[in-house]
Structures are given as C-alpha cells and as structure tokens.
Image: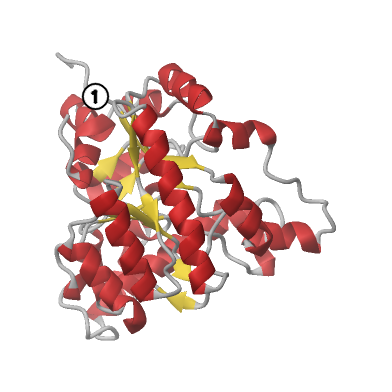
Amino acid sequence: MSKKPVVIDFHAHSMTQEVFDATYDLSVLGQIRAQAGGAVRPLPEKLLQRMINLDLRLADMDAMGVDIQVVSPNILHQCTYAVDPAEGLRLERLNNDYMAEMVAKAPDRLIGIASVPLQDADLAIKELERAVLDLKLKGVVVASRVNEMELGDPALRPFWKRAEALQVPVFVHPAGNPDPRLRRHSLLISLGQPLEEAYAQTSLIYDGVLDDCPNLKIAFAHGGGFIPYYAGRFDWIYRRGSTPQLKHDFSTYLKSFYYETVLFNIDVLEFLATKVDSSKIMLGSDFPFGETHPVEFVMSSRVLSDEVKADILGANAAKFLGVSL
C-alpha cells in the first residue's frame, strides 16, 4: 500500500459501572453464574478495567495499531431490556452520557455509539434522538432480540423507521442465548452468539424490516454469525416458494448488511468477501475480549487485494458511520 490507511476498529466495548451493577444479575451470563452457585467466574477485573480506564484503552489501541475505536456499550454484560422501561431509560441515559464524556476526552481517537431501552419503542426513540442529536453519538447498538421479542416484531417498526429517518447506523450485538444446552464447553460464546445473530438476520429479512426501511444501515458483530456461510439453504427455501414475502432471494438481502472481521480464521473472512460486497466489511476486534491483532489478521490474507484490505481497515467503517477520515 502506498499510504498507510487510518485504522478504525468498529467493534470495541465500554462499561458503565452503575449500569453493570443494575443489570448483570439479569443477564444470561449472570443467570448462569447464579445457577452454577458461583462456579462460573465473574467478569475478570483485567477486562473490566480495559472498558472503563481510558489510559489503558488508548495504550491497547496503540499496541494494536488502531487509530480510532468505535466504542459501544457492552450489551452482553449490561443489557437493560429486562428491567422496567422507565428504569431502562434512566440506565441508558447513564450509558450514553458516559460514552459522550469518554469521547470528549479523546475525540481524535474515539467514536461513540449509543444504547437505548428497546423494550419500549417510544422510549427507545426518545433516547436515540437525544443520543445522536444532543450528545452527537454516531450510531446505536441493539441486542439480537428484546427479551422474547424478535427484532422484526411490528412493535419495533417505529424505532427502525426513526433510525432510518435520522440516518443512524445500527450495530446488532447479541446479549446471549439462555438455552441450557449452551452452558457447557463455552458454547454460549462459540455457538450461542452467532446463533443469535442468525435469528436477528432472519427476523429483519423475513419480517420485512429491510423492505420497509431500505435505507437503514445495519451492521452485525462476529462476521455476521453463521448465515453468510450457509445461505444456500435459505435460498433453497426461497426457490421452492416457502417464503413468498421476500422480494428476492435470501443471499441478496445479506448484501444489505455490514459485517466486521472478528472471525479468527482468515479463510472465513476471505469467503465473506466473496459472499457480500467487500466494501461492507469493517475491521473489528471485540475489544477487550476478542482479536488482539486485528490489523495483522486482515493483512495476513493472501487472497484479498491491497485495496480491499485498506478499505476494511478503515474506509468502510467511516462510510458506515458517515464520518470523514
């Protein structure tokens, strides 16, 4: 590459202590820990500190070769959807105020994403407007479902339409799957999270959100979960006429989403770039939990062109967020 690209890590987390304290026991991880009688370890202090200590964050970014982090509230550990909507709004305001304060301390290094009480669409819209119009946050993170409600549920359609109207990009990140079968062998993380992403994608597609909100920008964590690599079965279901509500085949809808690179195997990333438009793939680390060498991971590909790599490292995220490099 003739010029070093600006490196943007799209997938990085923050923690707000009061929100964590109020919601962790209600989270899937907190419930598993309680049922195991404390046998499941709590969130390690080392990781917690990297989400709340700005100096540690910036040092880690420097070590990883990351110029800018896009920071979102850690919805896996501190999702507010299980609390009363009014309390959820209070907690999300704390999240977003904290995010705005953190970005203000390092505006050239951090971009903030909001979170909202999606269990109440009206309150979620209210906080979305405050977060992006007043606090100047650049997007919103949502979980892959809202308690037992899928993202395509009609009750949430006003939220999606408002996000589209405001041109707010959406980051879908799972908050965990409560299925007891996932409680061994760390399956909650290895199997449960991409499974949740699959549920969210199918709901957004089959339940009409993408058709109703064609200009809505949505990104998925963890390379999009399972479906981009197994879309043929969904296309087959479409071809045999079982999903007549779709305007075109399932794979075409997948090209509407954005994705990040937290995939860990380079051949999987290379396949993703053939399945969807490579201009919709963004660098991600899942900081502080996931890929510790995200730039080297992307650069290790012998298949992706230098131009595609450069775009993945930063330009695609800038386009998704609507920011200038």
Position of residue 119 measured from the top left corner of the image (x, y, whole percent): 45, 73
Q: Nearer the viewer, residue 60 or 80?
A: 80
Q: Nearer the viewer, residue 66 or 133?
A: 133
Examine the rendering and report whether any part of residue 249 can be seen: no
In the image, is residue 287 above or below residue 85? above
Q: Nearer the viewer, residue 199 or 213?
A: 213
Residue drawn where x is 44% and y is 66% of the image: 117
Examine the rendering and report whether any part of residue 126 can be seen: yes
Query: Which residue bears the numbered disc 1?
Result: 6
Residue drawn where x is 40% and y is 38% of the image: 101
Position of residue 206 measured from the top left corner of the image (x, y, whole percent): 30, 77
Q: Quadrant of the rendered structure where residue 3 is?
A: top left
In the image, is residue 308 above or below residue 249? above
Residue drawn where x is 31% and y is 29% of the image: 107
Residue drawn where x is 21% and y is 38% of the image: 318
Position of residue 182 measured from the top left corner of the image (x, y, whole percent): 65, 61
**In this image, 243 relative to 36: left or right?**
left
Quarter containing the C terminus: top left
Q: Secondary structure at mark 1?
A: loop
Q: Nearer the viewer, residue 177 or 59?
A: 59
Position of residue 86 measured from the top left corner of the image (x, y, whole percent): 49, 71
Q: Quadrant of the rendered structure where residue 164 is?
A: bottom left
Quarter containing the N terminus: top left
What amino acid is labelled 1 in the image? Val
**In this image, 194 relative to 261: left or right?**
right
Residue, far right: 37
Q: What is the basis of the colouring in this image? A: secondary structure
In the image, is residue 145 above or below residue 37? below
